[in-house]
Amino acid sequence: MTESPATQPAAGEGCQRVKNGLKPERNGFVRSLHRSRERQHKRHCHPEEEEVRTSSHDGSLYNQPFIETFEETPMLVAVFTYMGYGILTIFGYLRDFLRHWKIEKCNVASEREEQKDFVPLYQDFENFYTRNLYMRIRDNCSRPICGAPGAKMELMERTSRDYNWTFEYTGRSLPDVINLGSYNYLGFAENTGPCVDSAAEVTMKYGVGVASSRQEMGNLDCHEEMEKLMAEFLGVESAMVFGMGFATNSMNIPALVGKGCLILSDELNHASLVLGARLSGSTIRVFKHNNMQKLEKLLREAIVHGQPRTHRPWKKILIVVEGIFSMEGSIVRLPEVIALKKRYQAYLYVDEAHSIGALGLRGRGVVDYFGLDPSDVDVMMGTFTKSFGAAGGYIAGKRDLIEYLRSHSHSAVYAASMSPPVAEQIITSMKCIMGEDGTTIGCDRVRKLAENTVYFRERLEAMGFIIYGNIDSPVIPMMLYMPAKIGAFGREMLKRNIGVVVVGFPATPIIESRARFCISASHTKEILDRALCVINEVGDLLQLKYSRHRIQPSFGRPSDDNMYQDIDD
């Protein structure tokens, strides 16, 4: 890395065009980020395309191409999206007016007259979006399933007579719905197989609940075995497990940092990380998503200026990132983050909720994916709810860190222990991934997931859809943009027996509504081809093929000092 961050790409190494007056920020450009020390390809910029292509800051940090794409929102689509939200807002205020005068029935919870002097529980304006926009697409959310969330699932049929305020179950079910929404990356969330058999045996021996915390009477031998296996799996000194993934972040970060400490957080970090950072009482500064230039700038300022007012040195500086960002499908630029962490002597906290089991040749997460040393990450966090098909989370690292958390983490001291059958599910699936069960089931599933991910992404891009994220990420966002198309896409897909997750504002930026596909090793090629055929059909029906060009691979030089195109705030 260089001492001074570059702000312009080297000649011949990148091109940038701004079209229709759009500022090329996160909502308005394509980033194609490529790494390679072995190959160099000539790049071409076409007049009809707008993209920013940049090379690695130091090609030696990467041992394979690193490809991420974020195609710009077409100007016409952006305009119609804003218009759509504007029209919905106008009609929302009109309906609120009718509700106020009792012309339209109001189903929203409100304060009773005798409680008017209390602090309000229901903020009328804050619920505006829920009342008038979310209710239009609520039938796409919280759909109940009645079976294992495998490659196919069974959905309970429901209807609404009051425009999605309440639902009634018909008593019928929708069988063999292709599941493109669950985080079942390796297919271990199943109701048959060795994991289920082992969990059933443990249930007969231990029961389901522990009825105590780890520090009292809830520390079982299976918990000890799981932690030892987890440390071996990750290649670290020690590990500790928790019963809830969300609390693993929100309750452990406050135990690691506090007042006088600085947290540098990626702007797209999960809500559990954000909550944990806020609860810690530390100073929080946010850097642009995956932008190492911005991160380095914040690190420099923190070292030079110290704490506000007193200018004393920070007690700790903690960099907090995710392995795979669950809404963007992007992968953290971990080699560069580690290089910055070492240079400025900061600590690094990596949340591998979506990447553990789903990335790397051995399925051991983003560290394995980049071929890095696990000891370079100070705090390794992950959850068992995705690739392992279970529940809970873990913290792994040096033995001193884990021993400290055993006595200082609220989640360890006060929370009930992990259920024994859940622990056995984790142990059995982890042994499968490691090959300790005497089979190649785990390795085969890791390889199958990687193949399915690349295949599905490439087919969607070839069809003309705008796809976000890294080519190796099993989280695949497909852009919908307009508010009317959020609900329409989910409903049309379900009519064709495919279950998908659709997401809109405020979970995403207002003009970046999307469908989020989660690929699994349990998906066969026939299932994926059927899903792609339906997506193509619905995409034509709803006119969702917004992409105006195809992303061509390009590879950066091994020692290009221009890591990023600097973008003004």
Image (cartoon, rainbow, N blue to C red):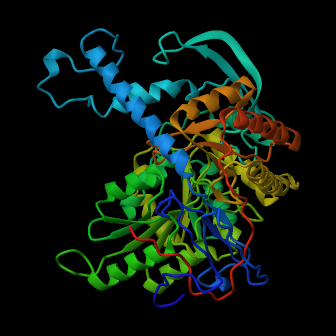
Q: Residue at x 55, y 69 (%)?
A: 397
Q: Is residue 282 above or below residue 53?
A: above
Q: Quadrant of residue 380?
A: bottom right
Question: How many labels sit on residues?
Answer: 0
Q: Quadrant of residue 302?
A: bottom left
Q: Position of residue 562 (x, y in %)?
A: 56, 83
Which residue occupies the foreground of this view, 198 or 483? 483
Q: Residue at x 53, y 70 (%)?
A: 399
Q: Residue at x 44, y 60 (%)?
A: 267
Left or right: where 128 falls relative to 355: left
Left or right: where 455 falls relative to 130: right
Q: Quadrant of the N terminus?
A: bottom right
Q: Is residue 95 visible?
A: yes
Left or right: where 217 falls relative to 541: left
Q: Position of residue 103 (x, y in %)?
A: 30, 8
Q: Residue at x 61, y 29 (%)?
A: 488
Q: Position of residue 471 (x, y in %)?
A: 71, 60
Q: Position of residue 435 (x, y in %)?
A: 82, 59
Which residue occupies the foreground of this view, 509 or 258? 509
Q: Is residue 63 above or below residue 124?
A: below
Among all residues in the image, which is located at the extreme left?
117
Q: Is residue 424 visible?
A: no
Q: Quadrant of the C terminus?
A: bottom left
Left or right: where 390 falls relative to 445: left
Which residue occupies the foreground of this view, 303 or 135? 135
